[in-house]
Image: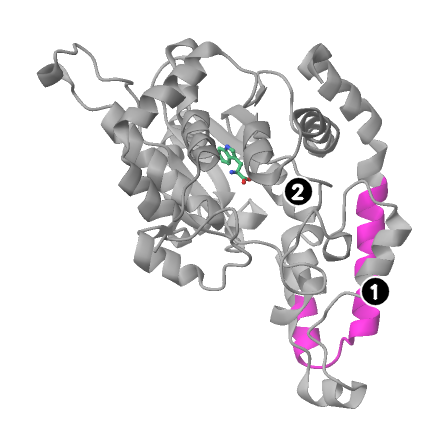
Amino acid sequence: MADFDPWTVKEIKDYGKLMSEFGMESFDKYQERFDSFRYMRRGIIFGHRDFGRIADAMAKGKPYAMMTGLMPSGAFHMGHKMVADEIIWFQEHGAEIFICAADMESYLMRDIGFAQARKIALEEYLTNYIALGLKVKGLHFWFQSDYISEYYKLRDIGSKRVTFNELEAIYGELSPGKIVSVLTQVADILHPQLERFGGPKPVVVPVGADQDPHIRLTRDIASRLNADRKDEGQAEPDFPCIPPSATYHKFMSGLQGGKMSSSDPKSHIALSEDPESAAKKVMSAKTGGRNTVEEQKKLGGEPDKCMIYELYLYHLIDDDLELSKIYHECKEGKLLCGQDKKNCAELVKKFLAEHQKKMASARKAAHKLIGGKA
Ligand code: TRP
């Protein structure tokens, strides 16, 4: 049986299990130190591997990189915004930024053509990243299908340091395309440590918990690539490197509960969406309300099950006091869902209107960065 398959995981119900079974560490001990960052302070980033190395590089002002990837699949929504905010936070905290458009993975695993993947990566992802505040200066952004030769060499030598059985144990049933996707992701994560980018350095990979199998595999391959190979008559290790670190975030739920997905417009608010249509979605989102107003006044609402509360928690309300006030008023049955949804719809409209003003110049910057390629 495979650990779990990152391409079919729907919802992760038990984050604790990831820690106890797969050795992910809790992020608790960094929560206070990085309390200026909403996702860290609120436990949305709940787990890590070797984050100490990154915290240390930050504290000492030493070089480190942040690397993450996106599979271009559809509209850029609030769930993607969380990743964008994380990337931008690391950039503001001194990381050199590497972002991969996983067009080979989307071709092999999701049947998305290369031209379409390029368009989505550029128009949806990169443009929104820039509009949200990502700086293009010093940014590395590439497509898996079209990159430097050392990257492909690294992917291929990686294949020598893992067995078929290991891959099967992690991913379950294999296919050639799956193996290529996985090894390409290993190269994505390790290649910021190539000579041409300054050699070995700490690299942090902020991802959703579903990506942990790839992180574990990459860390294993990294330590083998880094091993002394003198016995085999090699003067140098295959690839001198430091095992990558990772942070893991929880997923936002869809507006109707379940998973937020780019292919289901009812489940998400896209950042390019008409603010009025977004407001309507908010008004019909799943809440933690009771069956009747009387019941709710008596029993109180359940903010922990409410999609409106999640929107506040992840995105719309940065002030903890304000958020806690809403939480308690809901629980005590003083704030009812109708009013709460109206308040939320206003915040969403305001956010989208402001964000969308920045899109035109962001799109220009994105096209300039990718040049004639897309
Ligand atoms: N597999 C990731 C996804 O499904 C995309 C991805 C490709 C990635 N390369 C990466 C993520 C490297 C993190 C690091 O979204």
Closer-to-camera residue (165/98): 165
Say whether disc 1 or disc 2 marks the residue closer to the N-terminus. 2
**Residue 336 located within the stretch drawn in magenta:** yes
Tell me the number on the disc at residue 200: none
Residue at position x 26%, y 17% in the image: 238
Tell me the number on the disc at residue 81: 2
Question: In the shown orientation, is residue 166 left or right of residue 36?
Answer: left
Quadrant where the C terminus is found in the figure: top right
- Find the residue positioned furthest to the left: 231
Q: Amino acid at mark 1?
A: Met
In terms of image quadrants, where is residue 77?
top right
Q: In the figure, 314 relative to 244: above or below? A: below
* Local secondary structure at mark 2: helix
Q: Position of residue 370 (x, y in %)?
A: 68, 16
* Local secondary structure at mark 1: helix
Question: In the shown orientation, is residue 298 left or right of residue 70?
Answer: right
Q: Position of residue 58 (x, y in %)?
A: 42, 30
Magenta-drawn segment: 325-353
Tell me the number on the disc at residue 283: 1
Q: Position of residue 41 (x, y in %)?
A: 52, 52
**Residue 324 located within the stretch drawn in magenta:** no
* Secondary structure mostly seen in the magenta stretch: helix
Closer-to-camera residue (155/37): 155
Residue at position x 62%, y 16% in the image: 137
Question: In the shown orientation, is residue 364 left or right of residue 188?
Answer: right
Q: Amino acid at mark 2?
A: Lys
Can you see residue 30? yes
